[in-house]
Amino acid sequence: MASCRDRARPKYGGFSTLALSATKWTDLKVCPYISQAKVRRRRIRLRRDLRLLEDYFMARYEDIFLPDEFYYDSKDHLWAKLEGGGSSTGHLVRVGLDVFGQKAAGTAAYVKLLPAGKTVAKGRSFGSLEAGKYIGPLKAPVSGKIVEVNQEVIDNPRHVNTDPYGKGWFVVIEPNNLTEDLKDLVQGAAGIQEWLEKEYKEYKEKGLFAEK
């Protein structure tokens, strides 16, 4: 059984050791090595980490993590998440920028998105992003009609950096050619991991990541 000193150590591998060891929050109350202010902060971190561990299985390399149930545009680093919906395919597709993409683009300053009701073709722009090292279009990973737009990310573009798989999503698309559109997207745990490692090394060698 780890001591409370052990459980107070910093996060490891992107998740706090508290989450990885499933430590009870109440254990922190009696630990003499942690102040109550730190207890509160650790509880917040623990809730976040446990939610991530529960919701996602991740492909990881260095400081990049990609949920492996998503689909990825290998060129533009946009993710596509299939969700239940009333479309003819039985799915809706939520779209956002993956961690790799936002680290390369830098801090997001401005997001512009087409309104709901517009139809967009795969590979064509559904909006634009202005960030520290990137100003340009956001291209749809699938074709279809935009049925929902994230006003929250328009109002606060930093969500693209701070919560790319949560509050940082851009649009929801009702697809019209889903089966074909998914074929050339990176998918599956093994495929995503292989692509991530190769892409990371290439970007690192070329100095394409935005400076922190």
Image (cartoon, rainbow, N blue to C red):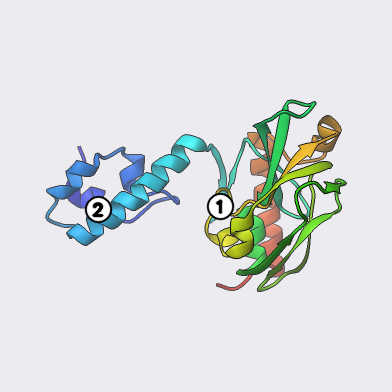
The residue under label 2 is 8
Q: Nearer the viewer, residue 96 or 110?
A: 110
The residue under label 1 is 167
Disc 1 crowd rating (10 Å Cα; few below 14, some 14-19, many 20+) is: some
For badge 1, the amino acid type reads Lys
- Residue 143 at x, y = what percent? 84, 42
Q: Which of marks 2 and 1 precedes in the sequence?
A: 2
- Residue 91 at x, y = what percent? 72, 30
What is the number of the mark on residue 195? none
Residue drawn at 63 percent across, 51 percent down: 169
For label 2, the SS is loop
Between marks 1 and 2 in the image, the one whose residue lies nearer the viewer: 1
For badge 2, the amino acid type reads Ala
Residue drawn at 23 percent across, 49 percent down: 6
Q: CA distance from mark 1 to mark 2?
A: 29 Å
Above or below: residue 87 compared with residue 81: above
Above or below: residue 131 compared with residue 35: below
In this rendering, position of residue 140 left or right of residue 82 = right
Residue 157 in view: no
Quarter of the view holding residue 209: bottom right
Disc 2 crowd rating (10 Å Cα; few below 14, some 14-19, many 20+) is: some
In this rendering, position of residue 161 left or right of residue 20 = right
In this rendering, position of residue 77 left or right of residue 107 = right
Quarter of the view holding residue 160: bottom right
